[in-house]
Structure formats: C-alpha cells, structure tokens
Amino acid sequence: MRAVGSEAGLQERHMPSPPDGGRQRVATGVSPWEREPTRRPAPAGGGRSSCTRPFPAVLPPPAGAGPGVTIPHHGLTPVAISFRPLRGLPVLLVWLLFSLNPTGAAEERRFPEWAIAYDVRMTYGAKGDGTTDDWAAIQKAIDENKRKFRVLYFPNGTYLVKKKLTFGSDKEQAKQLVLQGEWREGTIIRLADDAPDFEDPGNKNFLLTMFEGRSTGMAFHNSIHDMTLDVGKGNPGAVGVQWMNNNTGCMRNVTLRSSDPEGKGAVGLDLTRTEPGPGLIKNVLIEGFDYGIDALPGPFSMTFENITLRNQRIAGIRNKWHTLTIRRLESTNKVPAILTTDRGGMITLLESSLMGGAGEAAIVNKGMLLLRDVKQSGYGKLVKNDGIPDVKGQAVDEYVSHPPKAAHSAFPSPRRTLRLPIEETPDVPWDPPDKWLAADPTALKAKDDDTATIQAAFDTAAKEGKTTVCIPGGIKEGLIRFGDAIRVHGSVRRIIGMDTTLCVTPAFRTSGKPMFRIGDVASDVVVIERFTVIEWAKGNHFTWVEHATPKTLVMRDIGCMSRDAIPYVAADNAGKLFVENSCSALWRIRKGQKAWMRQINPETNGIGITNEGGDLWILGMKTENGGATVIKTADGGRTELLGGQNYSSWPPIKPKQPMFVVEDASACFSLGGLSFVRDRGYDIVLRETRDGGTRNLSVRDADAGGRGHAGAFPLITAWAE
C-alpha cells in the first residue's frame, strides 16, 4: 500500500513563465471583500514570490479575545474574522492600512505532478504564449473530458483563442467538467482582438459557453477556478462566459474582463440560457461589458458573494425573472448597478456598496427586493421602483419591496431579519506540493475495498507531517470504494479530491458509519472539498463526514448522488461548521452548534435541514421536493435563510408538509417559489409552535405575488421580540 507523494523532492506541475511575464504580473482589481492571500514582490535574485494573508486575516486580536472576534466593517453588519498574531503593528494601524488598500491576489494553486492528469499544455499541446492560437488544443481537451468528473488544468500563461470554446449542446455530455487555473492573474484565456465572429454587437457570441442546447438541468458540477477570461479588444458582441451548472457548481477566484479601451463587449457573465443553477459565484471581478451579469428566466437560483463590478456600459446586473442572492457586491459604475425588468425577478442583496453613479438610481426595479445594509453614492436615490414608492437617500438598514397579501408570520413577529452573526468561510493555506500526499491511484483501481489504501495515506501524512491528503481524480466512477470509516488525524488539514467520485461497498452502504471521521487533528480548521458521493441504491444508511472534534470543519464543493445518505453528523464536541456549494440533504445541526451555509441544495422528500437548537445561517438555497419540509427549527434554535428558490417539481407526497416548521424557536426566511404544475406547490409555507399553541401561515396569505400559484416570499418571520 504505497502512499504517493511521501518521498522527498516531489515534482510539481509548474510550467515555465510565459514570454509576457504572466507569472510575476502584479495583481490588480480584486474585490476588497476577498479574504484571499496577497502576493509579495518576487524576491531579489529570482525564485517564487511568497504569499501572505491580507491584513484582516492577520490582525492581532484585542486583549482577551480569541479566534472569530467580531469587528465592525465599513459601517455595515459586523463580520467575524479569524486572527493570527502579527508582531509590531497595533490593531488600529493594521486595520487602517487594510482600509486604504483592501485589494489582494488569490494565491497560486500549484498541484503535485501526480495530481494533474489533464494538463492543457502537457497533454494537449496548448502553448499559453499569448500569440499561438490555442483554440484547437483547448477545445479538444474539453471534448475529451466532459461528463467524466475531470479537471482541466491551465498552468500560468496567456491562452489565445480566435473562436468560441464550447461544452456543446448535448445535455448528457455538457457536465462534470472543471476548468482549473494556476492563479487568477497568471492564467488567462484571451480572445483575439477584432475576432470576426464577435464584431456584431447585436449578435452575442461566447468566449466560453458551458451549454448551447435548449435546456438541461443535467449540467452537474461544472466549475471554473482561479483564472481570467478576457474578451480582448474590438469584440463588441463578445460574452466572457455563458454559464451553466446544476445542483453543484461554482465560479471562484475568477476575473471576467474586456480589454477594449471603451469596455466593449456584450456580457461578462451570461445567465440567459435556460436553467442555470443552483450555483455559487464567489470572489469574482467583472470589468467592462454592456452588462456585467445578465440573467433571464430560470427555475433555479444563483448565489453570489464578494462580487466586484466595474465600468459597465448599460447596467452592472440585469435580471428579468431569475432568483439572485448577493452578499458583498461592490459596484463602481456610472450606470445603474442593478436593473430588474420584470415583477417575477427576485433579488436578495446584503452588505453592498453601489458607488460612482451619475444617474437617477443605483437600483432600477420592477421586481421584488430584500435589501440589508446597502449603501450608494453618486446616484440620485438608492432604488427607483415601478408602481410602489422609491427608496431615497444614501443607505438602508433593511427594506422589503413587496408586502404579502395578508400576513408575513403565523404569530405576531417583527418584519425584519434575525441578523444572526455572520462569519466568513475560513480556509487553510494552500500547501506546496511537498506537503501533499495521495492515496495510491494504482491500488485504488485494483481493489474492491479501498479502505486500507486510503487510510494508509492519512496515517503516512500524519506520521510525516504532511498537511494535504489527495484522493486522485480521473478514476472511473465506481472504482474508489469505502468499506470502513477513514480516520483523519494529526497534521492533516485539507482533504481534497480532484473532483473525484467516491462510492461505498455493499456492506458499508447500510452500516451507519461515516466515510470520514474528523478527529484528533492539529489544525484549527479542516477543509474537505471537491468530491461527489455516488450510491444509487435505495435504503442507504451511511454518512459522509463525522465531525468529532471541536475544531472548525469546512465542507466545500461536495455533491451527492446517493439517496438517503446523510452528509454530516456532529458529535457532542463538534465545532463550527461551514458548507459551500453542496447538493445534499438530511442535515442536522445539534444544540448549541453554529453553522453557516452558502449555496445549499437539500433535495429530498424527508426534512432537508433540521436545526435542533443551534444557530444556522444560510446564504442562498435551492431545493426540489414533492411537498416535504425544507427546514425545521426547534428547541430554541435560530435559523436565517437569506435568498433562494423552492422548485416544486416532484410528484406530491401525501400529506403535504409545511415548507418551514418552527417549534419554540426563532427563524426568518426569504425565498421564491416556482412550480409549473399547480398541485405540486405547497399549501402551508410556515407552521409555528409558540407557547403551547400552533398556527399555520398559508402560501395564499404570505405570497407577495409575481410568481404564480407557487408564491414568492421576500420575508417571512417567526420570532418574538
């Protein structure tokens, strides 16, 4: 049982610097909301420049404070920040320095040689020199690896293309593909200037399209990480990315840019193809274009966090009928930051700054809005509404555009959000290749039960002080099987798949055991990311992860194709939980625990999420079911759902359950509803028990209109002062 990567002198997947010097390019234009590392200048005499965290992540805590101290941030809702000691700089000085220069660059994602099986240079012959047309090489790489849960790796360089890159129009093929760059400022896919197919501003064409068919709903796990996509100069019809993912998928640490002096280009991020989402768009800068983001009708929803929009020509965001949840948007524009063109459009916007405007309003709105801690400067007013009063002034603490038909609550409750404390998803440093260790891929392919092979990797890592354990990708679905729980311990702080599929043995499937048990670890934070768990059989009874440590656990980019499998179980000593971009259901938050979820998709006909007395904060949710309860909160728990969509598409269960259940607890919910078949919607949106009594809030009474019989609920509350 050989653990790959334990030998000294590991080779790394790192290509020579391109002629344009992309490797040492100074990073610019990253959102000040980011918590990604900042690049230092290259050391004298050459060598790799080092990475450190930007100031907010290294502020020394005030006297007597520990990790997770909350500090006021730019006058908005306080945010929780983890601290590390920094010698010689007082707290105030460091905070002021960050306020003056808040930008930073995402760190490089260097992988060991053995981790990257599909490198567009090494495997497909792309040059990345900024002059050679790399279209054929990249398109071949896409065609040969889509639908296979594979990662295409783009080392630093400028990959010039003269034609559209596409995932195609076959919904059975345009899925399960991840584009991974080495560094967002160093990996650039660039459209040639004055490209013939992009010269018509009235006829959109795409630098990259992730689906060209009529509709899908099958584009599982498509993602883009750590790169820049640039539509070049003189291409007014160009779109940076026409996005398509379903259930899970994310764009993270990405720049979409028009290099045209006038910012010409149609759209940066295009969400107009039918049925994009649910997905997470995080740490993204969009510069130039007519529209930074363009969204049309869709039954799902998209979640955005840490988004920077600059120098759009018509609007920063245009939304017709989509459900968008946005936290920390920074728009610097002379045009409206947000333009909602239809009553069915629904936007939840939190902690955002809309600056520089010269027009009448920062937000021009015909749809439904929930705003919280939003400010503007330069515009005549914050919101210009259609048919209802405008929102004047510079800022708003909280605002709901459309009231319900009859009631926003079952019992008397304030008509405002709970404002639970928000903490940013923590991370651990991206380890250099010599700190990685992998389960032996040859052994994984050869055995029916891979427990011993995988456990050997974790044990060897702990013994040798390795901090990242990788379960390699590119292995055919069904060949990596867990037969027993894997013990995660010692120095391991990141468990990563190369978007790897994991299965279980027949005996394990009904064992009730976890696949991973996070126990005696040294790191304050453990991250598990980029896996899909697959077990199609009925009657599953196993868990993905057992959280058996007071240390913080982050579960990120994890999908599920396993009926009845439980994603997470918390031991009595379990610490904080953070979840990002996951299609998974049957979650349970224990009493006293704190959990934060971003882009969660709990599809089930059971209870999607149960909060048994903890604090649960959710940014963006989409779910499908047949009338089952989406979230149950009980025993003094507090739940805050900000934005999302319930898509009632499954055959109805009997009897239908309330969408939300609150029993002697506190909660608030903001989401849209959608159903194309009348009997598949909910009848009761909220059932609350308080002081011995129980009351129901019907969809009919709570509906704010604009979405048909399924209802739209900008804000429902269930809590007492």
Image (spheres, helix red, strand yellow):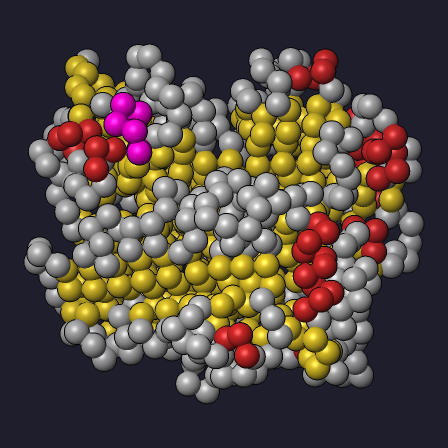
Residue sitting at x 34%, y 39%: 645
Q: Which quarter shows the N terminus?
A: top right
Going by the image, does 470 lie left or right of 95? right
Above or below for 503 versus 218:
above
Residue 380 image point, x, y percent: 16, 74
Is residue 107 something one can see in this rendering?
Answer: no
Q: Nearer the viewer, residue 348 or 719?
A: 348
Is residue 235 something one can see in this rendering?
Answer: yes
Quarter of image, res 328? bottom left
Q: Please check the rendered image and state whether residue 676 is part of the magenta-colored stretch, yes or no.
A: yes
Q: Please check the rendered image and state whether residue 138 is part of the magenta-colored stretch, yes or no.
A: no
Going by the image, does 447 lie left or right of 59? right
Q: Which quarter shows the C terminus?
A: top left
Q: Nearer the viewer, residue 365 or 632?
A: 365
Quarter of image, res 693? top left
Quarter of image, res 483? top right
Residue sitting at x 26%, y 70%: 336
Residue sitting at x 49%, y 43%: 216
Above or below for 578 versus 44:
above
Going by the image, does 690 lie left or right of 639? left
Residue sitting at x 81%, y 45%: 437
Residue 557 image point, x, y percent: 57, 43
Going by the image, does 174 lie left or right of 323? right
Q: Which residues are magenta?
A: 675-681
Residue 650 image point, x, y percent: 40, 25
Residue 512 image point, x, y percent: 62, 15
Above or below for 247 versus 209:
above
Count the labels in the image. Answer: 0
Name the residue at the bottom extreme.
Answer: 261
Q: Nearer the viewer, residue 420 or 618?
A: 618
